Image (cartoon, helix red, strand yellow):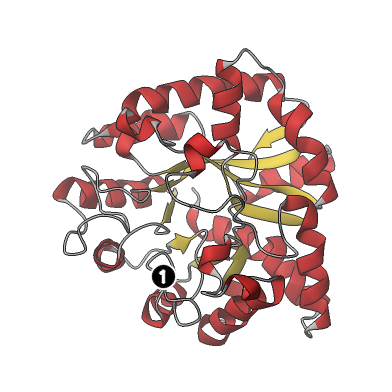
Amino acid sequence: MLLDIHGDIWTDVTVKSAQGIRNIIRDYHLERFKKGNMAGGIFVIWADPPHDLRPQERLIESIRAMSKELMDSRDIVQVMKRSEDFSHAIAHNKLAVMLGLEGLSGIGEDIEALYPLYQLGFRHASLTWNEQNALATGVKGDPSRGLTAKGKEAASLIHELGMILDVSHANDKTFWDIADLSDKPIIASHSNARALCDVPRNLTDEQIKTIGSKNGLIGINAYNEFIHVLPAERTVDRLIDHLVHIAGLIGIEKIALGFDFFEYLSSSTTDSFTSETYAGTIGLEDITKAPNMISRLSARGFTREEIEQISHKNFLSLMDRVLI
């Protein structure tokens, strides 16, 4: 079984909920998850384009839709706030879902909004998606701009609350500003190695080592443009090359899976960050193909224990290190 520590399911829920559709996880996603042997993961809220122009309203809309869906799905979804919630979910045949925030543009400079978000069950947050906002700077923002003063307050409060702080999508300056704030663990939930695919969304070797030194975690990303510059080489094995590279720098125990599948999202959302009709990895096109990656890991010499570490145990250990 596996945990996918980055999924945009709440975006799909928000879009479909606005159309009057209910039971979205049950009717549109559950069977796919089962085929992929997915036990849960982090489902994030983000200001999906074109709603990134109205992030505060979108945050409220998304929380409303998410809350309604969680009520409809209470027999199949367990909100995961601690690692023991994972065990409880598995024992009761439920998905173990951590509530996440991909970017905090929706709170503006209102740092204390993190308190009610925490009380609502969110245990994961990044400060920015690709944008430049009141707190931080994403990969499409000014490269000389990093965390703002309010952003430093937000990052510190996320650590204080015992939430997981995510640096995926942060530009290099923001990454290092966050890294310099604290020795507490940070994660990159869906990022690969820049040494193998030189794009800003991937991590440099020094960034990878810094996450490792903080006892953090990196989730390997199946978005094809982050795997290889040549489309024909955007395969499961090239993705595993990223995993091998990162493991060589910080150890197998600091690697997870953050697939970032989004084939279920509309083009009105995805056109803002990809020009391709489909952006999946060859052989790992969606969550139903996840067993292909597990098979390839085994074929390339990873032991059963190492595969279990990568697929779920490492993230559960990270939860124990961070969550209060």
Quarter location, residue 172: bottom left
Q: Name the residue under label 1.
A: 199
Front in this rendered view, residue 290 or 232: 232
Res. 1 in view: no
Quarter location, residue 141: bottom left
In the image, residue 125 sits, relative to residue 210, either above or below, namely: above
Q: Which residue is drawn at 41% across and 64% down?
A: 201
Q: Residue at x 24, y 34 (%)?
A: 108
Amino acid type, label 1: Val
Q: Which residue is drawn at 39% across and 32% down?
A: 50
Across and down, in percent, residue 230 comes to: 56, 75
Across and down, in percent, residue 71 comes to: 66, 20
Quadrant where the image shows the N terminus: bottom right
In the image, residue 83 sits, relative to residue 177, either above or below, namely: above
Q: Is residue 246 left or right of residue 173?
A: right
Q: Which residue is drawn at 41% across and 70% down?
A: 199
Across and down, in percent, residue 200 comes to: 37, 67
Front in this rendered view, residue 289 or 205: 289
Residue at the top extreme of this rendering:
20
Q: Is mark 1 on a helix, strand or loop?
A: loop
In the image, residue 168 sits, relative to residue 84, either above or below, namely: below
Q: Is residue 301 left or right of residue 9?
A: right
In the image, residue 191 sits, relative to residue 205, either above or below, namely: above
Across and down, in percent, residue 146 comes to: 21, 59
How many labels, in total?
1
> Circle 1: is it few (<14), some (14-19), or many (20+) Cα within 10 Å?
some
Res. 234 in view: yes
Quarter location, residue 206: bottom left
